[in-house]
Amino acid sequence: MNYKKVTTGIIVVWFLFALSASALQLFKNDANRIGISVAIAALVPLIVFSLWFAASPAFRQFALSLPSSTLTALQASRIIGFIFVLLQVRNILPAIFAWPAGYGDMAIGVTAGFVAWKLANPTRRNSYILWQLLGILDLVNAVALGTTASLIDPRSVSMAPMTMLPLSLVPTFLVPLFLIFHVICIAQARTWKVATQRSSQAAAPIQHPAI
């Protein structure tokens, strides 16, 4: 199986579904919260990836063969988190969500290029994994605040804009995609130490017993 073509096709279909469903307002929620339809759209790709990654050694090998630096560099697009801050200034999104999510995404986006260039290698393994975990924490924090904003601050503006185009593509497509990238990068980094140790052992000179 050509996993590169298959996964590319799946991502394209996934994006078109998220776009079409958003255009048809299937994710729209006028209540001051993100609805169940958005949650399902975000969770299904993560579940499919997790099961496929765990059950298929061939797919797992393909995923682990992807360039770590490229997957990390793609996180630079999260610099668009500044949009959340701008929308909060215009009183379109609640501050309890927009500030942490916006500035968190910007921090990851600004540092992604440096991490891909300098840390995506076995010698910087721990720092690389730490950055990936911080990226995951930012996404999880944004999702948590997005779903509980109305409970934390009932008087805040509605989260409804996040359920309509173009913002609906963030929770239904970009967030799970970035999470998958983070997970793959961490899984790759966990193999670096083993690979380095094996290389060192192979390169070590053979000690012959003295006669």
Image (tube, helix red, strand yellow):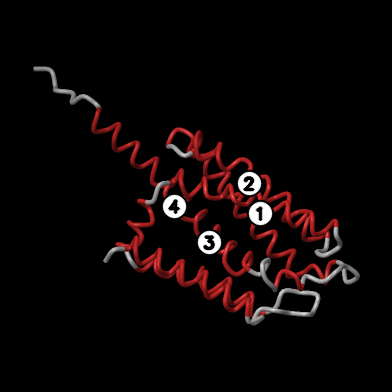
From the image, tell me which residue sits under label 4.
187
Residue type of the residue flagged with mark 3? Leu
Disc on res. 108? 2
Give the CA separation, mark 3 to mark 2: 15 Å
Q: Secondary structure at mark 3?
A: helix
Earlier sequence position, callout 1 versus callout 4 = 1
Disc on res. 138? 1
Q: Secondary structure at mark 1?
A: helix
Earlier sequence position, callout 2 versus callout 1 = 2
Residue type of the residue flagged with mark 1? Asp
Q: Are marks 1 and 3 in contact (CB under 8 Å)?
A: no
Give the CA separation, mark 4 to mark 2: 19 Å
Give the position of the N terminus as an image quadrant.
Answer: bottom left
Q: Are marks 2 and 1 in contact (CB under 8 Å)?
A: yes
What residue is rendered at 50% in x and 36% in y?
119
What residue is rendered at 46% in x and 46% in y?
70
Q: Are marks 4 and 3 in contact (CB under 8 Å)?
A: no
Give the CA separation, mark 4 to mark 3: 15 Å
Quarter of the figure with residue 168 = bottom right
Give the position of the C terminus as an image quadrant.
Answer: top left
Give the CA separation, mark 1 to mark 3: 14 Å
What residue is rendered at 62% in x and 52% in y?
78
Disc on res. 23? none
What residue is rendered at 77% in x and 61% in y?
97
* Disc 4 crowd, CA 10 A, few/some/many (<14, 14-19, 20+): some
